[in-house]
Image (cartoon, rainbow, N blue to C red):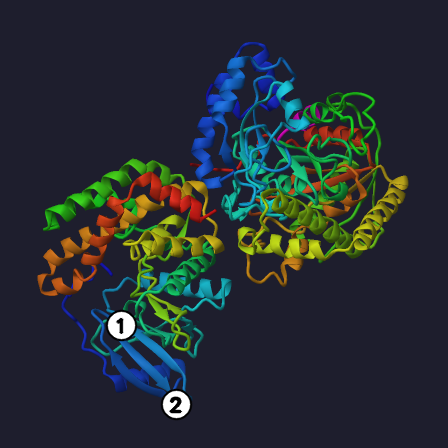
């Protein structure tokens, strides 16, 4: 198969070709690897190639699951593959092999996906850009001098550059939605508890983090979430299963939704004009599709919310690093981690039990405030990002001076964290492009547990304003 | 280091220092005295203003391409906007706000002149290299490359003999290297380069300084263990950024630990991808081969200047010998390990 054909299909489409014996899994892997060799030197999306593992899995016979034979990539954090290191973008973990598969990875394997590599991530997924010391920067296929976003920047760049139609990702503060917006892709952050972290941990970042994927098509995202949402015995909490498979929501009439929209930047600053225009345009689009759309001012103390997130995240980082220090019997040295990580580590070690519980209580209180808003609305529409993707280096996580890092970070991502905090599903949909040709994602959030509404709406938007044909002019 | 710097007939009489001082007053509104600084081709004056400031006045040779002059000016302005504390020269504007002035005399072709801030440090080439200095070189170049990343003026895609991407074009010049052993080393490096060229072409490109050698770097006059100046943007070109690091590292290539100090410091500020790391040694050797080849050729063209032109050849040769003697896999592993 030629790349020009390959890139025309989403994962579901490729799986159909394999099922019809029009192409083999091995041929698809060849195309994916060839594309990777061509574009990866410039985008640096894939940081660990697992060709031998993928060839062996194909030779052994892939399970006849819904995505049988489709080449697939894991983000190099949280989703573990037995015998392969999960670096988390950190030198500390670069060579430590996972003892067992994550249940998510097992589910992907059972679905027939051919996992052939790991994608780049900033250290511990802490940044909204993907420029770790360990692997070097991932570049945005739409403009190689700009960030692909983060923390799932490697996953997004790999999909945008055509290496794969979909890639695994995770989102603890926007890490699926931010790179999806930067790279012109679809990214769903599921509800809290939708995808299990078993067997390694019960939750990530105090329940803020969720696992899923970045895709080009809406149906790929839905099918992958059907594969991924399998609660495990011992999980601390989980979402009730959907009334029907998410895949069946795609194409189903969403009815008239009550949609509140805002052009505000919730946590910090204000949106750049292209983002404001994109929100207004998306609101008009929803109205033209028959939805009841009105402007709304979301309630809540967003700065207090962000401070609570800081405590939960830095305490989690401290736990991760101290556990490793204990395992190896040697403390973590400052020069083993980036300056941002070190700052978080120090902050996390100082946090008292009281401070952690306060943070969690504030996080839960914020969830109740947001739930109130969703008594009136089915969906909230807002900009995924505060600005178009900035140049690489704008959010340097290894800078000696991090004094205005927070301001730069939240100017870029003012709107994603609230839905990690509330535990609601939220998606970034590639509905706009700036005058200079940079993608601008529009974010939609729904009630906790209600990914179904978002998938119905997303599929309607995908049909009304398709983005499949929009590709970066990435010439190798 | 311009291969084209032929000592062509001077069509113009040299300006003297009084004339330069009057020119600076008229064009820039700066009152002061001028002192000539020797230069192969252009005319350069040190200007000390009455209020205690120091500048450098450059009056370019009338053959010098205005595009090339403007490219350097644009680069300095771009860098000052992106990273205002990087120690590059600042472009001083004329009383009319222009970034260049015209030095004209009746009956002579007009010449472009430029006034820049003066950087007082010593040439890095004149002081012993130390670990802190090597790390500073890496850090400064990394910051410079970050600042240059968005710089994409029209003239940056140009044909330049020092463009590493075109290294194989130097093959016909290898014959000008007199020493057979050195010629073989250079030929081997170019051979290796050709094999890796396809991979190099896939890396992201940007504007790079392309000549970060100890003659283009100044120490900080107040703190000699620090770098206080980066000069000469005349070899700028659009190329993979790893080429910029390879050029800088090629001047420290006779000791792996020295080389790694520089590379690690660069990486800490401007992280390298795995694909870039894999090409570094090949590119350092390529630059050294380019250096001995171009010098050998120019020394034949201008035998009267041969000693000056060949001044860097012994150290480039030492680098080539040293790197050729390293076990490739062990060297690459050491690099990968150091960047971890």
Distance from disc 2 to disc 1, alpha carbons, whole Å, reads: 28 Å
User: Which residue ends up furthest to the front in the rendered image?
Assistant: A329
Q: Height in image: B144 above or below A207?
A: below
Which x, y percent locates residue B55? 37, 79
> Counting other residues with Cα less than 10 Å from the Cα at mark 1, is it few (<14), some (14-19), or many (20 or more)?
some
Residue at image x 68%, y 54%?
A: A410
Instruction: Determine which residue is flagged by label 1.
Output: B110
User: Which residue ends up furthest to the bottom in the rendered image?
Assistant: B50
Q: Give the prevailing secondary structure in the magenta stretch.
A: helix
- Magenta-colored span: A216-223
Which x, y percent locates residue B316? 22, 55
Judged from the image, the secondary structure of the residue bearing numbered disc 1 is loop
Task: Choose top left, top right, bottom left or bottom right for residue B151.
Answer: bottom left
Position of the C terminus of chain A by quadrant? top left
Residue A430 seen by the camera: no
Residue at image x 72%, y 40%?
A: A204
Instruction: Determine which residue is flagged by label 2.
Output: B50
- Counting residues from the N terminus, which is met first, the one under dot 2 or under dot 1? 2
Judged from the image, the secondary structure of the residue bearing numbered disc 2 is loop
- Reply yes or no: does residue B39 show up in magenta: no
């Amino acid at each position: 198969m030629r790349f020009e054909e390959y890139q025309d299909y989403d994962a579901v489409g490729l799986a159909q070709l394999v099922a019809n014996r029009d192409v083999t899994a091995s041929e698809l892997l060849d195309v994916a690897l060839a594309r990777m060799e061509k574009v990866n030197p410039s985008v640096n999306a894939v940081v660990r190639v697992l060709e031998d593992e993928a060839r062996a899995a194909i030779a052994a016979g892939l399970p006849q699951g819904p995505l049988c034979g489709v080449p697939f990539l894991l983000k190099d954090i949280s989703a573990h593959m037995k015998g392969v290191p999960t670096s988390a973008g950190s030198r500390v973990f670069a060579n430590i092999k996972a003892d067992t598969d994550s249940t998510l990875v097992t589910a992907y394997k059972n679905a027939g996906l051919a996992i052939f590599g790991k994608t780049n991530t900033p250290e511990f997924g802490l940044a909204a850009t993907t420029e770790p010391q360990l692997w070097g920067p991932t570049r945005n296929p739409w403009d190689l001098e700009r960030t692909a976003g983060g923390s799932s920047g490697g996953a997004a760049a790999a999909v945008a550059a055509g290496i794969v139609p979909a890639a695994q990702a995770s989102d603890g503060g926007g890490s699926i939605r931010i790179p999806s917006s930067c790279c012109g892709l679809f990214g769903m952050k599921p509800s809290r508890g939708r995808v299990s972290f078993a067997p390694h941990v019960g939750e990530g970042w105090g329940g803020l983090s969720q696992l899923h994927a970045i895709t080009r098509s809406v149906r790929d995202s839905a099918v992958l979430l059907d594969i991924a949402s399998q609660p495990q015995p011992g999980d601390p909490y989980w979402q009730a299963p959907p009334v029907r498979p998410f895949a069946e929501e795609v194409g189903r009439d969403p009815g008239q939704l009550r949609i509140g929209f805002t052009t505000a930047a919730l946590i910090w600053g204000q949106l750049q004009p292209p983002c404001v225009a994109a929100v207004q345009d998306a609101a008009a689009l929803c109205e033209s599709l028959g939805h009841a759309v009105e402007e709304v001012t979301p309630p809540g103390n967003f700065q207090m919310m962000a401070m609570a997130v800081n405590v939960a995240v830095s305490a989690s980082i401290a736990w991760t690093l101290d556990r490793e220090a204990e395992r190896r019997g040697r403390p973590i040295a400052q020069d083993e981690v980036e300056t941002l990580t070190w700052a978080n580590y120090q902050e996390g070690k100082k946090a008292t039990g009281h401070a952690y519980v306060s943070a969690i209580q504030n996080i839960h209180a914020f969830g109740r405030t947001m739930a109130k808003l969703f008594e009136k609305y089915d969906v909230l529409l807002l900009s995924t990002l505060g600005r178009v993707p900035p140049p690489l280096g704008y959010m340097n996580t290894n800078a000696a001076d991090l004094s205005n890092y927070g301001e730069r970070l939240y100017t870029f991502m003012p709107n994603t964290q609230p839905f990690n905090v509330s535990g609601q599903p939220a998606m970034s949909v590639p509905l706009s492009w700036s005058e200079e040709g940079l993608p601008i994602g529009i974010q939609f959030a729904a009630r906790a547990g209600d990914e179904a509404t978002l998938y119905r709406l997303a599929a309607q938007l995908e049909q009304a304003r398709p983005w499949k044909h929009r590709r970066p002019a990435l010439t190798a | 280091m311009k291969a084209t710097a032929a000592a062509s007939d001077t069509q113009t009489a040299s300006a003297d220092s009084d004339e330069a001082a009057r020119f600076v007053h008229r064009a820039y509104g700066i009152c002061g005295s001028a002192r000539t600084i020797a230069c192969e081709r252009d005319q350069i004056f040190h200007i000390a203003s009455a209020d205690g400031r120091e500048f450098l006045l450059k009056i370019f040779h009338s053959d010098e391409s205005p595009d090339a002059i403007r490219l350097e000016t644009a680069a300095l302005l771009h860098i000052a906007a992106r990273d205002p504390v990087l120690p590059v020269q600042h472009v001083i504007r004329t009383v009319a706000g222009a970034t260049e002035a015209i030095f004209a005399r009746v009956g002579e072709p007009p010449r472009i002149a430029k006034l820049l801030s003066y950087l007082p440090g010593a040439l890095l080439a004149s002081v012993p290299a130390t670990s802190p200095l090597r790390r500073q070189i890496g850090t400064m170049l990394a910051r410079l490359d970050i600042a240059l990343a968005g710089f994409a003026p029209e003239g940056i895609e140009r044909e330049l003999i020092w463009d590493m991407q075109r290294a194989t074009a130097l093959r016909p010049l290898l014959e000008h290297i007199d020493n057979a052993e050195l010629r073989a080393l250079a030929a081997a490096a170019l051979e290796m380069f050709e094999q890796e060229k396809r991979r190099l072409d896939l890396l992201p490109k940007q504007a790079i300084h392309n000549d970060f050698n100890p003659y283009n770097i100044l120490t900080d006059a107040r703190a000699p263990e620090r770098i206080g100046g980066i000069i000469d943007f005349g070899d700028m070109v659009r190329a993979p950024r790893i080429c910029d690091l390879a050029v800088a590292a090629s001047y420290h290539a006779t000791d792996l630990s020295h080389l790694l100090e520089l590379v690690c410091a660069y990486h800490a500020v401007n992280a390298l991808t795995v694909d870039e790391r894999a090409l570094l040694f090949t590119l350092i050797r390529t630059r050294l081969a380019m250096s001995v080849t171009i010098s050998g050729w120019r020394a034949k063209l201008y035998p009267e200047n041969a000693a000056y032109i060949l001044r860097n050849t012994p150290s480039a040769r030492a680098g080539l010998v040293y790197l050729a003697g390293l076990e490739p896999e062990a060297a690459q592993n050491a690099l990968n390990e150091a960047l971890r």
